[in-house]
Amino acid sequence: MSILESLRKIVQEANSAKNFDEVLNVIVHQVKNTMDTSVCSVYLYNKKDDNYVLMASDGLNPDAVGSVCLPSGKGLVGLVASRAEPINLEEASVHPRFAFFPETDEQLFHSFLGSPIIHQRVVLGVLVVQDKQTRRYDESEESFLVTIAAQLSGVIAHANATGELNRTLNPQDTPTNERIYSGVASAPGIAIGTVIAMHSHTALQATPSRQAIDVDTELILFRKAMSLVKSDMRALDKSMVGILSDQERALFDAYVCMLDDQALGGEVIVLINEDGLSAQSAWTQVILSHINMFKSMTDSYLRERASDLEDLGRRVLSYLQETETKRTVFPDNIVLVGEDLSAASFASVPLEKIVAIASVKGSRNSHLAILGRAIGIPTVMGAIDLPWGNLDGEEVIVDGHNGHVIVYPNTSLRKTYESQVLEEKLLAADLEKFLDQPCETSDGHKVSLWVNTGLRIDSMLSLDRGAEGVGLYRSEIPFLMLDRFPSEEEQRKSYREQLEMFSPRPVTMRTLDIGGDKDLSYFPIEEENPFLGWRGIRVCLDHPEIFLVQLRAMMKASLGLNNLSILLPMIASMTELDSALVLINQVYNELTQEEGYEIQRPHVGIMIEVPAAVYQIHEFARKVDFLSVGTNDLTQYLLAVDRNNSRVADLYDFCHPAVLRALRVIASGAKDECTPISVCGEMAGDPIGAILLMAAGFSVLSMSATSLLKVKAMLRQVSLVEAKQLLEDVSLMPDAQSVRNYVEQALNKAEVSGLFSR
């Protein structure tokens, strides 16, 4: 068996293991056999006692497992961990760091190869192989062990997040159900509420575990789904006559047989009847179990049948989701939880009842996180270990300041968070005093605060918070909420409502910005690298039939109000801008000259959000009526950090010195061409970001409504002179954290001490 085949088999068996202990035992047994060595062992770091504990072994004395502990930094295991690199020894006993533990019986072994188990720069343990022969493991063996250790790191990290690692290392500790899952702090605030788990359509792995409300109803739904899929299979079989051979068509008969009560169907019925699971949960549990079984098989033909099972599983699940009884009663305080939540998730849940959001995937600048900040809902993204499918109906705490989701909190912790919720309410009430005060610095410099909107609720909140205009209306929101493209009239009504609501204040409407992390279910864009692909203006120019309808709706909505500005996203070249302007002029001429509408031509601007636009700032500024900086994407592209990837979330920060320098170039270029410029990215709503932007020369900042008073309070506490000096001081600093620390220390005033949470 090849090394690659061995690796695949080990990973499959580990994935099929029932618990953490079984995973470790699978690893040591399979690695020992694959490498044809005498021993394979796993040592895990116990933070509580600062030592490495032998937690699994095939070859050492079984009685030593769980009892042998190596102090941190001691022995060869400690050396591997401290160096964070493999150590390969022909004769371990002669090494000065060798430590002998007679209870392991390792006096029988000579050679030693150890690889650190590392997750996100933290050493979690050491994977070791030993042999009775005096030999040096070759390069392929060393590479294999390193690869296995890398695979094992994710399993251990997950066990650490769920508390299983601590229970394994410290079984004497008092057991507790409380779990704290870490993610990315994406929208500030704290909320306590009841989970509603949102599943992804026909995604087997993303189906939440739910109990049946009525077992008889679930059985009826399941049998109906079985019948429909069987009918589909028989129809498909008939359509393939003459196209596929009888042998190839036999697969459809096999599908039908699998669904019988004597096969998969029977297993599901047992789970519904005896365990009280919903039809979806029971079907998913059974089908995934069989898929994992097939994937772990040695025979390649049988392994490939796993994909057939997965296809069958999705077909049945699709019908179950269609026939599922829709939820009609919702708790008052909803925490929306899912694997990969999007804006469309709001459509099936009363928005006014949502108090928090937690998503397994995504980052602080995912579109959903931006919406969370816009409407003031605490949000945690990228909580990769969160067992979201098992939390439906459970009470959880979402800490949007620190990026934590707390499940089954104890009484003491719950009271602590309840007091913090009260403190936040008091701070919000205290900020109300700034509502009617102008946004100007202590030395009289005026800054205009605008808002980013998209949902009706955050538009209403914006007006209550004294917004002076709309710097970004996300026109894709109506598109995301439907299962088809909205008509021209549907769009016109939506845009008209927004323009009337803010009239006579200016409203800047961004044209359809899909792609990247904003995907339409009815117009999917499947790309390996979506942020560098088909998105924003690129989609609109390739589909003028969509773009022109939207432009018509926007201009017709502005009739008699004349407060519309049109903003073009993702512009990277003059060719794109010229092409868009041709279409804008075409629509304006059609409406005014051919159809008789008395419409004032809207101002047209572009978003500066790709590096190419930064270096053509003068050319762009001369061509448009205004510029608007999208700091979210600009930061992403300048730092080469996918803002939706939780693994690199810590690298994404608009306070990075390179971003600050780019912003100064942009502001200077716009000033040279006398072109109005604003910022509509999330940086504008961050108190530190707002100060640095003002210092760079931006006098119009657009942000979520919930940030308006915080930013106003901060700007009123500083002078423009002070802000400019801060920007000069931090521009040459080495990293974003240094910038943040410096600004916070410089502005350490009692009046603004509670405004720094991100």
Image (cartoon, rainbow, N blue to C red):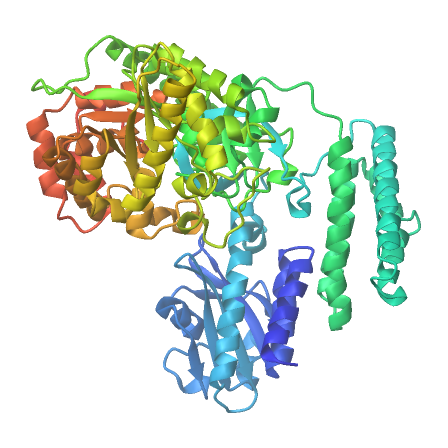
Q: Where is residue 537 drawn, in percent x and y?
A: 39, 40
Q: Is residue 6 left or right of residue 107?
A: right
| Quadrant housing residue 207 | top right
Return the residue found at the far bottom. 134
Q: Closer to the camera, 159 or 667?
A: 667
User: Can residue 101 be seen?
Assistant: no
Q: Is residue 303 left or right of residue 499?
A: right
Q: Quadrant of the N terminus?
A: bottom right
Q: Closer to the camera, 732 or 752?
A: 732
Q: Quadrant of the C terminus?
A: top left
Q: Is residue 328 left or right of residue 369?
A: right
Return the residue found at the far right. 262
The number of numbered badges drawn on the structure is: 0
User: Can residue 261 be seen?
Assistant: yes
Placement of 550 over or under 652, stated as above or below = above
The residue shown at (66%, 45%) is 203
Q: Is residue 90 left or right of residue 303?
A: left
Q: Closer to the camera, 497 or 226?
A: 497
| Quadrant housing residue 245 | bottom right
Q: Where is residue 317 drawn, in percent x and y?
A: 75, 42
Q: Where is residue 204 drawn, in percent x and y?
A: 69, 46
| Quadrant housing residue 684 | top left
Placement of 691 over or under 366, stated as above or below = above
Q: Where is residue 95 drawn, in percent x and y?
A: 39, 83
The residue shown at (33%, 43%) is 576
